[in-house]
Amino acid sequence: MRIAFVGKGGSGKTTAAAVFSRYLAELGRPVLAIDADINQHLGQALGHGGAPPRALGTDLGWLKDHLRGTNPRISSAEAMIKTTPPGWGSRMVGLAPDGELLARYSGVAGGVRYLVTGEFDEADIGVSCYHSKTGAVELYLNHLLDGPGEYVVVDMTAGADAFASGLFTRFDLTVLVSEPTRRGVGVYRQYAEHAPGHDVALRVLGNKVADTEDVDYLRDRVGDALIGWLERSAWVRAAERGDVAPITTLEPANITALRAVLTTLDEQQRDWAAYHGSTVAFHLRNAVAWGNQAVGTDLAAQVDPHFMPGPGADRAMSA
Ligand SMILES: Nc1ncnc2c1ncn2[C@@H]1O[C@H](COP(=O)(O)OP(=O)(O)O)[C@@H](O)[C@H]1O
Ligand SMILES: [Mg+2]
């Protein structure tokens, strides 16, 4: 199951992604956290003090060659764009930590395995913006076969930027983290406008809630979309100062909120056919918008009409 935390900058996306990932790890669930934010703080929030792991977005040639495998429809890494869907011969990947991809790119912090997309750098500015980095996440998720009981937690970039790519359709649940403020719920409205028609399950997790007035405010503005709320937390504040404690010592009200998020996530059902249909639709749209011109071929030919990811699709590896 895949969950993305979105919301305005400073709302608590990274905090929520980190504590939720650590909560899952504490429960013994397989979990992979992914830092897809421009400001890369997830490792730190998980409790990592050292150098981050190798960034997924810095070695796209390797990543593309790895994922395209022996797929005859994708002639080279250069011909593979962020939306290129997997097909027969593609390498579908799983969450086993000893897999080649995770062995190469992932680190561990606070008991959680995690990937980072890499910092925004000079080369990105004006050319491809941050999308080349989040594009690596999109590619990765398009080739990931995660089953029920396995979790991928993504800390997304601020605002509604994610809608500029197909990334926002890659999740079973999108949780908008919102403080009980007008700007917080404003971002929710933005998302709620984009979500229909894309099969996006969008819910709200309140954050930095101080009292029942805050809860009433959120409930009044977002209604049933509210799945819970994190209170202003001394535990989080201490972690911010470098004093990272076991997740079991998080305030009980905040554990309750994490449990509510997990319950909502587990209730989601992935429809692999609809999911793959959306992968293909985004690819065709990108092909026409810029991909065909950039690569110099008709990228619609990369779509394999006989392939669908899902249970058993790893057989596609050995074409
Ligand atoms: N529930 C909370 N209690 C106390 N501090 C919090 C809480 N949630 C977030 N913070 C603090 O607010 C700041 C912004 O949070 P962060 O998770 O980095 O936001 P975002 O990733 O959305 O930009 C950080 O300093 C973080 O420690
Ligand atoms: Mg953040």
Image: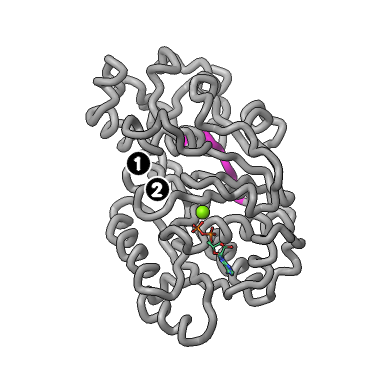
Magenta span main SS? loop
Is residue 195 in view? yes
Do residues under tags 1 and 2 come within 8 Å of each other at their CB atoms? Answer: yes
Disc 2 is placed on an element classified as: helix
Check the image and report above or below for 250 versus 18. below
Residue indicated by mark 1? 165
Q: Is residue 11 toward the left or the right of residue 23 in the image?
A: left
The reply to whether the residue tagged 2 has its Cβ within 8 angstroms of ligand 1 is: no
Q: Is residue 256 magenta?
A: no
Check the image and report above or below for 309 versus 212. above
**Residue type indicated by callout 2:** Phe
Is residue 316 in view? no
Residue indicated by mark 2? 168
Q: Residue at x 35, y 25 (%)?
A: 303
Write down the region rendered in magenta. Answer: 142-148
Rendering coords of residue 66 (x, y %): 55, 21
Q: Dot 2, crowdedness within 10 Å: few (<14), some or many (≥20)?
A: many
The reply to whether the residue tagged 1 has its Cβ within 8 angstroms of ligand 2 is: no
Q: In the image shown, does 121 or 114 lie closer to the viewer?
A: 121
Q: Residue at x 38, y 18 (%)?
A: 79
